[in-house]
Amino acid sequence: MKKYIIMVIMICFFAVPFTAFAEENNNNIQKKTLQQQVEQQYIEPEDYIPVLMYHHFKTEEVEPGNGANMHIDEFEEHMKTLQQAGYTPIFLSELYDIMKQAQIEKETGVVVPELQLDKKYVVITIDDGYRSNYELAYPLLQKYNMKACISVITSRIHTGYVYSSKEIEKMSWENLNEMQNSGLVEIYSHTYDHEPVGDRIYTDVRSSIQKGEEMLDKQLENRSPVSVLTYPNGNYRKNIALLMYIYMGYDLQLTTNSDVVNRNTSVLEVPRITVNSGWTGEQLLQKIEQTAQKTFQQ
């Protein structure tokens, strides 16, 4: 009986500090897990590059949430906010150099967290080639010294094209050459006729793209050192993208997949963030951060 009482006392004596230790250890684990979650939620802006996508700009009111039209004042606020937030705009040709270097490092066994850039970079892309790009957006690019990349539907540019009642007027080749010669704009292909890839066969897709490139070669005074294809409506197929790389030599192919560029991004499927009307500059920054979080959680 005495032995039993002594054993119970000893168990109670040692159980108290053990319980306290277990609770303290559990608290430390919870704190560590919370800290890891906080660290995971914030991703260094130097470890990725957002590629933004714009289209047409207007001086009239635009309903919020429109990804194809935007009031020019909102675009100016975005340019100003990006600049104040420390972002440096770069061309797609510069993006390609960064992605290529990252790929070389991976192939040679260099293991580093993400891109580890020396600055916060952003790429501004504008699709279709609307006249508003020249008349409204270009003066703001000059004002804030911001670089942009414009992908044009080449068949809509030449003077002989007849617009339908629903179409918005596009730029002239003179406009495009002026912007590109300024050093603030690079011009790329959005195909000849803006027909989505869909289920079309490769030769059909290639024909449209080849005609677009031939017009750019003929009409532009200078071409970018990097070859870029911007898919109509972001619509593409992986097998088509591979064939475009192999036979057409495209360095970058732009989609509308909503992610940010990082060390694992393929040059065949460059993602972009569709910028909607109604976003303030602060909301744009939040969207960039949210997209980065989503990208790194995949």
Image (tube, rainbow, N blue to C red):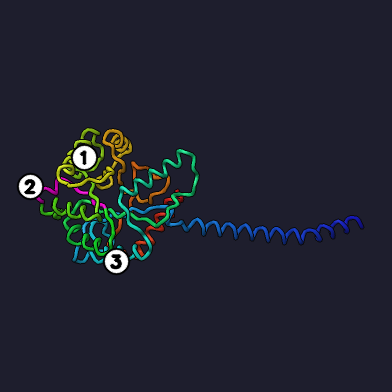
What is the three-letter code of the residue carrying label 1?
A: Ile
Q: Distance of mark 3 from mark 1, alpha carbons?
A: 34 Å
Label 2: how many residues lie within 10 Å, few (<14), some (14-19) or many (20+)? few
Q: Image quadrant of residue 56?
A: bottom left
Residue 8 belongs to magenta span: no
Q: Which numbered marker is on residue 160?
A: 2
Residue pointed to by mark 3: 77
Res 167 seen here: no
Q: Residue at x 27, y 33 (%)?
A: 247
Residue pointed to by mark 1: 209
Label 1: how many residues lie within 10 Å, few (<14), some (14-19) or many (20+)? many
Q: Position of residue 10 (x, y in %)?
A: 84, 58
Q: Image quadrant of residue 124?
A: bottom left
What is the three-letter code of the residue carrying label 3?
A: Glu
Res 31 seen here: yes
Q: Secondary structure at mark 2?
A: loop
Disc 3 and disc 1 in contact, CB within 8 angstroms = no
Q: Residue at x 39, y 55 (%)?
A: 291
Q: Earlier in the sequence, mark 3 or mark 2?
A: 3
Instruction: Answer with left or right where residue 290 lies relative to residue 169.
Output: right
**The N terminus sits in image quarter:** bottom right
In front of the other: 72 or 144 = 144
Q: Secondary structure at mark 1?
A: helix
Disc 3 and disc 2 in contact, CB within 8 angstroms = no
